């Protein structure tokens, strides 16, 4: 019985048992979703604020279940910790590249930005894998951007630098995601060959009436400009935020104020409308 179990084992045992059961269930569920490719990608517009730049789309993973979507903010870290991220990452690469090919064939050529997990970069065969994927989809590396969060970069900076160099030489663009949220953001900016930084949405969300955050965002924009790195502000939710970013020369903006992530058909309709 339960009471017996509590007496015989430590006080904490039942709670740990429950959590383990939940994790086992999630693991089984996620593993079968991977096998069945039961995911989809949504696309959120990233819109230029300066002349001569093209709009593009960030691909965001969705795991549909009964009318709602499980949050990638939760199941991606779980997948990373339980050996499922490589297969999920492969799904994302395949689907995003096929999206680029389909949209080109439909006369609406797109550039797509893909989120990469640290584990994918660490596998080392990423450049070869990407090359195979591009060939299979029949698309060009110039239509693919790769987003790496700062947490990805914490490891061996020199090793990561040389992988990024290889990817850039192959024609991919590289963006640092969630910039400013980590411990050595400036170091990454100086040491790593990147094309873009995406300013962490926490800084954008708290711009209003917050002179400190305004100064931080202005400084990031000025520094990036000085070293020839483009800037993206994500999480733009208000007209005031947009006006501030425009006034300070941010290259691209992304956020609910402009457009939410959406299914492929809606995204292409959005492009037709705004093109
Ligand atoms: P992220 O890469 O920083 O993506 C931005 C997140 O902010 C997305 O959440 C997006 O839907 C949300 N967002 C966009 N505009 C706004 C806004 O104006 N306000 C607010 N509050 N949020 C906004 P989402 O789609 O839930 O993704 C969460 C995280 O999961 C992503 O953060 C990324 O780290 C991870 N993720 C998503 N798709 C993938 C993927 O295919 N591969 C990997 N490795 N990670 C992914
Ligand atoms: Ca394919
Ligand atoms: Ca991202
Ligand atoms: Ca981000």
Image: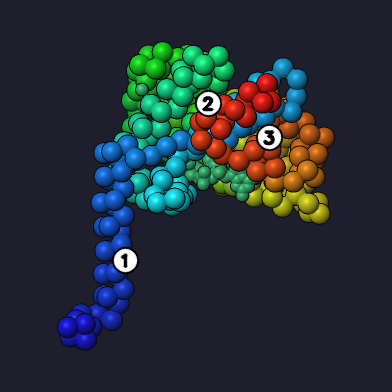
Q: Earlier in the sequence, mark 2 or mark 3?
A: 2
Task: Say if residue 133 shows up in the picture.
Answer: yes
- Ranked by sequence position, the earlier of labels 3 and 1 is 1
What residue did someone put label 1 on? 19
What residue appears at the point 30 percent right and 59 percent down from the top-left corner? 23
Where residue 222 sits, quadrant-wise, is top right
Label 2 to label 3, Cα distance in Å? 15 Å
| Position of residue 190 measured from the top left corner of the image (x, y, whole percent) | 60, 31
85, 136: nearer the viewer: 136
- Within 10 Å of disc 1 (Cα), the crowding (few <14, some 14-19, many 20+) is few
Left/right placement of residue 265 relative to residue 248 reads: left
| Secondary structure found at label 2 | strand
Q: Secondary structure at mark 3?
A: strand
In percent of width and height, residue 129 lies at 35, 23
User: As displayed, is residue 135 above or below residue 66?
Assistant: above
Residue nearest the viewer, comparing 20 with 97:
97
- The residue positioned 26% from the left and 39% from the top of the image is 35
Would you say 28 lies left or right of 196 here?
Answer: left
Q: How is the image coloured?
A: rainbow
The local crowd at label 3, few if under 14, some if 14 to 19, many if 20 or more residues have their Cα within 10 Å, is many
Helix, strand or loop status at disc 1? helix
Task: Quarter of the image for the N terminus: give it.
Answer: bottom left
Q: Nearer the viewer, residue 66 or 94?
A: 66
150 left or right, relative to 251: left
Marks 2 and 1 sit apart, C-alpha to C-alpha, by 37 Å
Q: Which residue is mark 3?
A: 253
Q: Which mark is residue 112?
A: 2
Mark 2 or mark 1: whose residue is earlier in sequence: 1
Q: Quadrant of the C terminus?
A: top right
Residue appearing at x 35%, y 31% in the figure: 90
Quarter of the render that holds ligand 2 = top left
């Amino acid at each position: 019985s339960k009471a017996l179990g509590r007496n015989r084992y430590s006080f904490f045992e039942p709670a740990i048992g429950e959590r383990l059961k939940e994790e086992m269930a999630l693991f089984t569920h996620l593993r079968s979703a991977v096998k069945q490719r039961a995911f989809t990608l949504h696309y959120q517009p990233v819109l230029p604020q300066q002349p001569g730049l093209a709009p593009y789309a960030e691909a965001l993973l969705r795991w549909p279940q009964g009318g709602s979507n499980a949050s990638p903010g939760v199941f991606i870290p779980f997948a990373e910790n339980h050996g499922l991220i490589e297969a999920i990452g492969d799904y994302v690469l395949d689907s995003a590249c096929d999206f680029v090919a389909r949209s080109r064939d439909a006369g609406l050529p797109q550039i797509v930005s893909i989120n990469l997990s640290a584990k994918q970069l660490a596998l080392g065969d990423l450049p070869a894998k990407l090359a195979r994927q591009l060939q299979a989809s029949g698309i060009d590396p110039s239509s693919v951007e790769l987003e790496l969060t700062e947490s990805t970069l914490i490891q061996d900076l020199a090793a990561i630098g040389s992988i990024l160099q290889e990817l850039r030489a192959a024609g991919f663009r590289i963006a640092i995601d969630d910039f400013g949220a980590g411990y050595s953001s400036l170091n990454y900016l100086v040491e790593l060959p990147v094309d873009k930084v995406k300013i962490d949405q926490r800084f954008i969300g708290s711009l209003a009436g917050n002179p400190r955050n305004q100064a931080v965002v202005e400084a990031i924009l000025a520094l990036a400009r000085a070293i020839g790195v483009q800037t993206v502000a994500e999480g733009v939710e208000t007209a005031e935020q947009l006006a501030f970013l425009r006034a300070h020369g941010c290259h691209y903006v992304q956020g609910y104020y402009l457009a939410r992530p959406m299914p492929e058909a809606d995204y292409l309709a959005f492009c037709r409308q705004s093109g």
